[in-house]
Amino acid sequence: MTLDPGAGARQAPAQVASAPLHHRIGRFEPELGGALSDVTLAYETWGELDEFGENAVLIVHALTGDTHAAGKPDSSYRRGGWWEPMVGPGRAIDSEQNFVVCSNVLGGCYGSTGPSSIDPESGRPYAMRFPVLTIRDMVRAQKRLLDDLGVKRLRLVIGGSIGGQQALEWAVEFPAFVEKAVPIAATNALGPQGLGMSELGRRAIMADPDWQNGDYYGSGSFPQNGLAIARMAGMMTYQSAAGQWERFGRRPASRPALYDEFGGRFEIESYLHYQGRDLVGRFDANSYLYLSRAMDLYDVAAGYESEEVAYSRIEGEVLFVGISSDWLFPPHEVRATAERARGTGADVRYVEIDSLSGHDAFLKDWDEVRAAISTFVRPEADG
Amino acid sequence: MTLDPGAGARQAPAQVASAPLHHRIGRFEPELGGALSDVTLAYETWGELDEFGENAVLIVHALTGDTHAAGKPDSSYRRGGWWEPMVGPGRAIDSEQNFVVCSNVLGGCYGSTGPSSIDPESGRPYAMRFPVLTIRDMVRAQKRLLDDLGVKRLRLVIGGSIGGQQALEWAVEFPAFVEKAVPIAATNALGPQGLGMSELGRRAIMADPDWQNGDYYGSGSFPQNGLAIARMAGMMTYQSAAGQWERFGRRPASRPALYDEFGGRFEIESYLHYQGRDLVGRFDANSYLYLSRAMDLYDVAAGYESEEVAYSRIEGEVLFVGISSDWLFPPHEVRATAERARGTGADVRYVEIDSLSGHDAFLKDWDEVRAAISTFVRPEADG
């Protein structure tokens, strides 16, 4: 087999930092009240910003995601980038053509200021003294990061789930700044079924005595059980019934039981147990509370006279992507959001990914996601 | 307005006992192992058994249900019978024509032997020393109760959800005894989405330190938080997305918050909180564990060479009832179960209730349930 250097260059892994950079954006006042006196955002970048500051792409991560959108597995990120197949030289999000940025959301626990950060005023972690955040707060904080990085305009902002809510909010909040937005698996506002699942997860965390009203930092304990149950609830909303039948069915567990009771276990139970344990090892419980709450609270119409008034602000192009089997943000709701936005005259399209993977399809069905977005995000690569 | 005595008699409330009766069926050996040395079943009856013992109808309750299928609200049962509009003189389940029985399931906490009962061997509550139960165990225990009551044959066995699983199992386990069976909102086996929701509820109970490995009886504490969260998870599976949009939408809570954090609340959250608190006041957490586990484990094929071999045992008529918006036992799965059963030559029909109420439709959409079952259960009342 001979190597084609040209093809090889196209397939080379994206250049990645092995850990995020950190940038202080300073004082920040969340829209629902309170204040953060010194906010830092963690971020990673791929590619170079052009001299006009107009080739930037912002990737917005999902609920428990981080800055590491791209990159092969390494010692810092053993799983590699969470959107690796989508981002890199020659890929759908092309880091040769664009300056690609992914920042950890405000309120997160992967380097950005969040409930686990030290409050400079008190010298101890914010915990539940952290102010309630909204999607708009997250977007405003990201905007200040991009301003400081010299970005003058976003070619594209793209993300799924809570990242999709942010992509939509970007187009509404900073219309002149956003050329294109791709909200994936997100609507104008989460429905009651999603709200309910979200709340039962939060209650599980808060009912855990190790949560200690949020002040578990430095206590030597952590609300492991609560966060694991919240994750189990989350995972249920990220998958579809049909997908779970295919993947798990009623097959017995193939891994050792994490819990002993009731003898035999189903594979779906074992899967949920391991997913719960995994998140406990990598995520802050209070961040989970704040970020899931922001997801619940998001309503594109908030602060405007109506949903339509919000959409009428949009100046760029928006592509909503629904997932056929999504039950957290069902495709008919994503489509309806797109239709209402288009009804105001905004340049809005809708495309649906046909997948059994449920809500999580945007994190695994690479070919389908690529097919859904590529013409929109890279029209120059067509034909 | 003049009263028509004839019509009045038809509308009179069913005669009900104000508390269940209790019957000892003695030693019982669950199919998966273990033994219960002295089992009692609580039950209520409406109407009279005929001299041949052949006019009995068995109503099987849902997961957290009790013996009190019929009756107006009174001091013992402030809510009245959970199937009151369906049961009584002249009603779909006619207590003038039939001897109607409803017994609390084995493993329950409304008078039948369950984890909260005293183990005569040890003198203390079984708690988690109670043997794992199956749907077949519940049916076999009910059969012994009916034998002792002089019932020779069931005209009808009917129930929804875990009650529907039992109705199906009755037709398979005691084919000569069952003239008609109506499993509502139940299939041959629960799917992985249901299994997952069920398990996260159990984990919430077991993660609650007040659960104390099940030995909370007499301790002065009870796993309130855990059971409430399990109930919240259960409620999510009992309703449909469309029904929740209609009933709750994203409206703010109309009741005082049970929990303080994060300020404003959505109505769906408040609803779940109150449902959780309600169940804590009326149900045993260990019973919840055992009954939900039995629901998970149910597989009509268990112990047979195949699902088809199980169905081929059926001698009576079976009417499966699906609910269009049910996602715990989705209608296409109920229909598929019915079709597989019919494929073996069994006398099986399927009817679907069109409702936004989700799984719970069988406990609230009275007209629709009546319409679905009346021709099947009361052919003499037709035409």
Image (spheres, coloured by chain):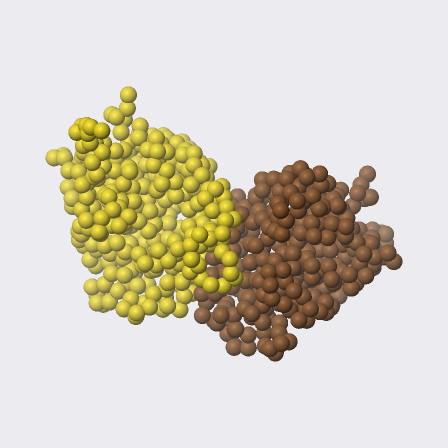
Chain colours: A yellow, B brown
Question: Could you say where residue B82 lies in the image, as x and y percent from the top left?
Answer: 67, 57
Residue sitting nearer the eye, A112 or A33? A112
Image position of B4 (left or right of A319): right
Give above or below for A327 relative to A52: below
Quadrant in which the C terminus of chain B appears: top right
Question: Could you say where residue A334 lies in the image, as x and y percent from the top left?
Answer: 42, 38
Question: Could you say where residue A110 lies in the image, as x and y percent from the top left?
Answer: 26, 54
Give above or below for B59 relative to A178: below
Which residue is pictured at 66% across the width and 71% down the height? Answer: B37
Where residue A290 sits, quadrant-wise, is bottom left
* Residue closest to the far left: A51
* Residue closest to the far top: A383
Image position of A6 (left or right of B141): left
Q: Inspect this view and state whether residue B234 appears.
A: yes
Which residue is pictured at 62% across the width and 54% down the height? Answer: B162
Which residue is pictured at 20% across the width and 54% down the height? Answer: A40
Give above or below for A362 relative to A350: below
Which residue is pictured at 86% across the width and 56% down the height? Answer: B52
